[in-house]
Amino acid sequence: MSKTINIPLGSQHIALLEPVHFTFECENEHIIAASADVGYVHRGVELACASKFRFKQVGFVVSRVCGLCAIIHATCYTLAVEKLMGIETTKRAQWLRLLANELDRIHSHLLCLAHTAENAGFEALFMQTMKDRELVMEAQEALCGNRVQFDFVTIGGVARDVDSRMIAILREKLTKLEQKIENIKSMFLTNQSLSLKYKGIGKLDFNKAEEFCAIGPIGRASGIKHDVRAVSDYLPYSDVGYRLITETDGDIHARNMVRLRELDNSLLMIRNVLDGLPEGDIAVKVSGMPEGEAYMRVEAPRGECFYYVKGVKSQTLDRVKIKTPTFACIPAMIDVFVGSDYADAPAILASFDPCMSCTAK
Amino acid sequence: MRMRPLFWRHLTLACHVRRSKMISAILNTLTNLFSKPATRNYPFEKEPKDDNYRGLIVFDEPKCIWCLQCEKVCPPGAILFTQNIENGAYTYNYNPYLCIYCAECVRACPDKASALSQCDGLIPPAGKNQNVNDYWFKIEEEAIASKEEYKKMKALKKSQGGDDAKTETA
Amino acid sequence: MVSKTVVPKEAIVGIVKGFYEPHKHHLVSIHGVDIGGSIEVQWVFCEYEDENIKAFASEFAYDDTIPSFRDILPSSWIHEAELKDMFGVDVEGAKFGLFLEEDGVKAPLRRNGV
């Protein structure tokens, strides 16, 4: 029996952006066992939604579960309640919701790529990616009025309308962004020091990924053909040119490539939305109270986000269950750690794109 | 001086085509060395805000019809009305530090009144010597208590007024 | 297409094991709903390549032991730990303490308190 030591990757660490604590049992710097503590930012959102707030206000509460995928939570909850109450929104509202969701996906993927580059030691690429991400944040500020918490989706439609000035700003910023993303992509593809850090490291092969039910870019990089946007029509994705993107290797390089190719697809979809935005109202009137149960799934930047909403014909809901993508990928992440080197742990962690405020709601 | 970074950029692109990565990396470094920084020179340069930025809520008192819908829909409870015990008139209280600037109150205000609107102003952060919390906690208690007292007083007056009418007719 | 099936609690293990195929389905969520006096636990599955959500539900009393599916679904340990924390019920093999502290509030999602 050789000796093993326990090394913590604590909640305070130079490579960590998220409050999570890992304990690695290492033998000569090879990790042979891992355990995680993920509940640092538990705020009791599910209990608050079912007791303290009315169902029309829960959309705002639920946005504040996460800062990166705020609008995804609001969209999923709103679609679940609209399903319960039998409300049909206008076409213009659906296309505007799609526009906001895809802008959110771009800014979230750019943040993850920047963080992955930072953990590999390439701080210059991290700063350049963050500088390019500012274009998206300004576009979101023009559309929704705020950079992070949008409060854009309401029950029955959306809150604000776009006019020609906003569309011109969006087009200008996205044209600039396309060129910048090409530069970033060529860096990730051809830079030799990054490929030493990424290729072959942190592999999650296809069978393990299916066993652990990995979802999102992590599952797609291992070859699982799973995307909620491909099979469900919660928003008109088939009208704007959506494509399912998979890779086969399952290592960190494959996950980065999935995210980069999804960025290109999102830019194409936004351009199609701006070209073909239908006319009409942005919201319908809502009356009545929700009664019954509803299940709703939506594709967040990190995977599949699931909501279960139960109403009992009163202003307060009975139960709101939130299942976030990082919560479902934590078992797969711990499995990938086992068998890797301790020195690769920060890069693997960043490539999994964890969002701890989503996990510990 | 402005032509110089463009020249370096073209040379970098040419080197990319020739796959000379080392030289293109060096040229990239030199380009970045001689170009403007990407950050703004705060506090001398202010952050530009969009025209449609979601800012403070503005209350236009003459137009208000006192339906209290905005108080009901506000998610964090940043608008509260306290009621005067003598004449039942309402007073509008708004807490800009609790507000999330979602504009639900603006949408809830009925069309015939339109007393609320959103501007793009902001408030500076509250310093330590501004008792924001204590002042607002008092208003929260007063909002509930004053409405209940007024309701009780009205009910009392109604029952007293009914008794008087009965004694008169009798 | 969404479908929910309520099964008696003795039969849930057999039914889920007979239904789940690793290449076709993935586990979406395991959660509980307090229906007044007992807890309804739901196991939600969905297909990879089609939109068919299938939910199995069983009613358990507060002091029952809920079976675990860790042998066929290795990633279910995190869902079961959350279920144990939030409702204060006993789940096979789950440890307390994923979200809540030892000296904090117990079983917050139960309707009438512990």
Image (cartoon, grey):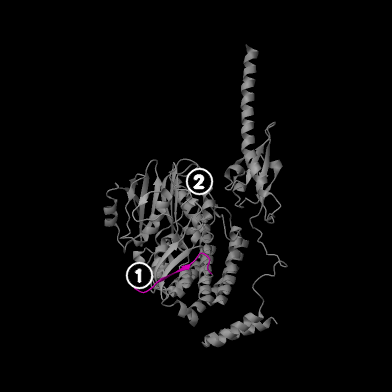
The quarter of the displayed image where residue A138 is located: bottom right
Q: Which residue corresponds to mark 1?
A: A206
Q: State whether residue B15 is above or below residue A28.
A: below
Say what secondary structure mark 2 lies in: loop
Label placed on residue A255: none
Residue C35 lies left or right of residue A52; in this view the side is: left
**Magenta span dominant secondary structure:** loop
Q: CA–CA distance between discs 1 and 2?
A: 41 Å
Instruction: Please indicate, yes or no, whether residue C62 appears anywhere in the rendered image.
Output: yes
Question: Which quarter of the figure has residue A206?
Answer: bottom left
Residue A108: image location, x then y, percent: 52, 65
Q: Which chain does tag 1 point to?
A: A
Left or right of C79, for residue A171: right
User: What chain does badge 2 belong to?
Assistant: A
Q: Nearer the viewer, mark 1 or mark 2?
A: 1
In the rendered image, the residue lying farthest to the right is: B44
To which residue does mark 2 refer? A55
Residue nearest the observer in this picture, A92 or A351: A351
Is disc 1 placed on a helix, strand or loop? helix
- Give the magenta part as a residue range: A1-13
Other residues around mark 2 within 10 Å, as few (<14) / some (14–19) / many (≥20): many
Q: Amino acid at mark 2?
A: Phe
Q: Earlier in the sequence, mark 1 or mark 2?
A: 2
Same chain for labels 1 and 2? Say yes or no.
yes
Q: Quadrant of residue A171?
A: bottom right
Residue B83 in picture, x, y percent from top left: 66, 36
Q: Amino acid at mark 1?
A: Phe
Q: Judge whether residue A262 is colored magenta.
A: no
Q: Eyeballing the image, is A78 above or below B62?
A: below
